[in-house]
Amino acid sequence: MRVIYTNTVTVNNLRGHIESGEKNVDLSAMYIELKNGDEKRIYVIPGSSLKGIIRRNLKILKCDTGFLGSEFDEGRSKMSKVIVGWGYIREKAEKKVKYGIRVNRQLGIVENHSLYSYEILQGKINVNFDIVELSPLNEEEKKCLAKAILLMKYSTIGWGGSRGIGVVEEVKLDDRLLSLLHKK
């Protein structure tokens, strides 16, 4: 039987990364609604983005990242021991349109036709994500995973971190991962 760890991050003003097909906004917030029986999930962050943050944090902690599988720039392919699922919310979130401008980085001036619009999911949003063990993790890998998830606090998820969008304000670990950190 596979083990599934459900974790939650509280994010302020989330912004996903997809192009809009709508005429009133250039960059839409990611917002994919799915219903399975009585359970409704609204997917807002790709699992690959969450996995990338976890991998970066594992490197900061000087933990082995091997259980996450190989990275894109590696020549060899190694299967991951875990799947990091998409980030989802359970309740609708209010969308808000904001505006930005494109700046020419070399010249430091605003480019022609540079005004663009983007959506954010406004306010504090509890984003859940599951980590599924495909093959058993050893205790050290689980501890490193737990620490890497906790290290997500005050980092940013999604696009717009430099604008204060997507700041992780709180992290709630799955109880089984949290209990490993309190073991002596």
Image (tube, rainbow, N blue to C red):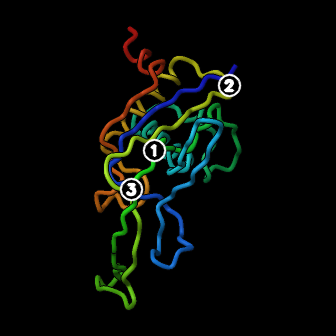
**Total numbered circles:** 3
- In percent of width and height, residue 152 lies at 38, 40
Q: Give the CA distance from mark 3 to mark 1.
A: 10 Å
Which part of the image, by quadrant, shows the N terminus?
A: top right
> In this rendering, is residue 119 above or below 132?
below
Which amino acid is tagged 2? Answer: Ser
Residue assigned mark 3 = 94
**Seen from this angle, which residue lies furthest bottom?**
112
Q: Give the CA distance from mark 3 to mark 2.
A: 38 Å
Direction from residue 151 to residue 76 in the image, left or right: right
Q: Earlier in the sequence, mark 3 or mark 2?
A: 3
Q: Give the CA distance from mark 2 to mark 1.
A: 32 Å
Which part of the image, by quadrant, shows the C terminus?
A: top left
Which amino acid is tagged 3? Answer: Glu
In the rendering, which numbered label is found on residue 162? none
Direction from residue 102 to residue 66 in the image, left or right: right
Residue assigned mark 2 = 135
Direction from residue 6 to residue 73 in the image, left or right: right
Q: Earlier in the sequence, mark 2 or mark 1?
A: 1
Q: Residue at x 44, y 42 (%)?
A: 127
Q: Residues within 10 Å of mark 3 (few under 14, many from 20)?
A: few
Which amino acid is tagged 1? Answer: Glu
- In percent of width and height, residue 96 lies at 36, 64
Q: Residue at x 39, y 18 (%)?
A: 181
Q: Nearer the viewer, residue 80 or 132?
A: 132
Of tags 3 and 2, the one toward the viewer is 3
- In percent of width and height, residue 24 lies at 45, 77
Query: Mark 3 touching mark 2, by CB under 8 A?
Result: no
In the rendering, which numbered label is found on residue 91? 1
Q: Residues within 10 Å of mark 1 (few under 14, many from 20)?
A: few
SS label for mark 1 = loop
| The image quarter in which residue 122 lies | bottom left
